[in-house]
Structure formats: structure tokens, C-alpha cells
Image (cartoon, rainbow, N blue to C red):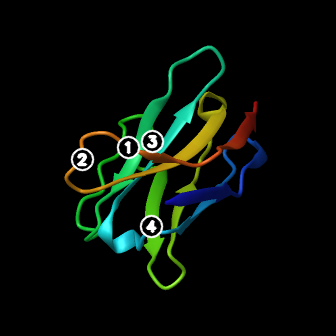
Amino acid sequence: VQLVESGGGLVQTGGSLRLSCAVSGRTVSTIRMGWFRQAPGKEREFVVAISGSGSSTPYAASVKGRFTISRDNAKNTVYLQMNNLKPEDTAVYYCAARNPSASMYSYWGQGTQVTVSS
């Protein structure tokens, strides 16, 4: 499974960005996909995930109501729409994938930088 993120950049506080994660090697509807982020000097943290069926989309409390995960099965791509961005959202964002029965994410993208200026 290969994951390629895109869509990061520099945005002002209150702005929006949409990240994309193109998946190859597996169909997104058969695996669980997640977005994580890592800010400078901090550990990587969970942001949001989407189950293979799309019925489960748990969000971290810090992004709930501002971020939305979605998926385009035809393009085999997962998206992260980020609205009302805050400086504390600044981080490298990673998409990840795991088999539904696995407890750990096995596949990771290279990451894309998101910087929110105040």
C-alpha cells in the first residue's frame, strides 16, 4: 500500500485547506484510513479516521466541528477538509492505513506541511 499526501501549505488563521491522500495497492473501501499530525517538538497525534464502510469517523476533540474527512472511492483518495484553521493546527499531516482487523496503522504517507499564521 502506498499513500501520497498533497494539499498542504501556508494559510492565515481562519482559513481553509484541503489535504488529499491518494492510495494505491488497496481499495480505500477495504481498509481503515486515518489522518495524524505532528507539530514541532510534539508527538504525533490522531486527528480523524474513516472506516472501510465509511460509517465510522471518529474525530479528535481539538478538530471536531472544523475538520471533515471524506473519501472518493472512484479516485481511491481520502480527503481532509480543514476549516477555521488555528495556529495550533500547524503540523506535518500524515495519512495512514491499516487493515480493519489490525490494531496499528501499518502504512504511512510522507507527510505534508500545514502552517497557519496568526
Identity of the amino acid at label 4?
Answer: Ser
Query: Would you call the spot at circle 3 few (<14 residues within 10 Å), some (14-19), or many (20 or more)?
Result: some
Identity of the amino acid at label 1?
Answer: Tyr
> Whole-Å distance between the Cαs marked 3 and 2?
25 Å
Furthest toward the bottom, the residue is: 74
Residue in the image at 64% along x and 55% along y: 5
Residue in the image at 74% along x and 37% along y: 115
Identity of the amino acid at label 2?
Answer: Ala
> Whole-Å distance between the Cαs marked 4 and 3?
15 Å
Q: Is residue 83 visible?
A: yes
User: Picture coordinates of residue 51 (x, y %)?
Assistant: 28, 61
Residue holding disc 3: 63
User: Picture coordinates of residue 13 (x, y %)?
Assistant: 70, 39
Q: Nearer the viewer, mark 1 or mark 3?
A: 1
Query: Would you call the spot at circle 2 few (<14 residues within 10 Å), some (14-19), or many (20 or more)?
Result: few
User: Picture coordinates of residue 114 (x, y %)?
Assistant: 70, 41
Residue holding disc 2: 102
Residue holding disc 4: 70
> Whole-Å distance between the Cαs marked 2 and 1?
7 Å
> Whole-Å distance between the Cαs marked 4 and 1?
18 Å
Residue holding disc 1: 105
Task: Choose the circle earlier in sequence order: 3 or 2.
Answer: 3
Task: Choose the circle earlier in sequence order: 1 or 3.
Answer: 3
Q: Is residue 18 visible?
A: no
Q: Nearer the viewer, mark 3 or mark 2?
A: 2
The reply to whether dot 4 and dot 1 touch (C-beta < 8 Å) is: no
Identity of the amino acid at label 3?
Answer: Val
SS for callout 3: loop
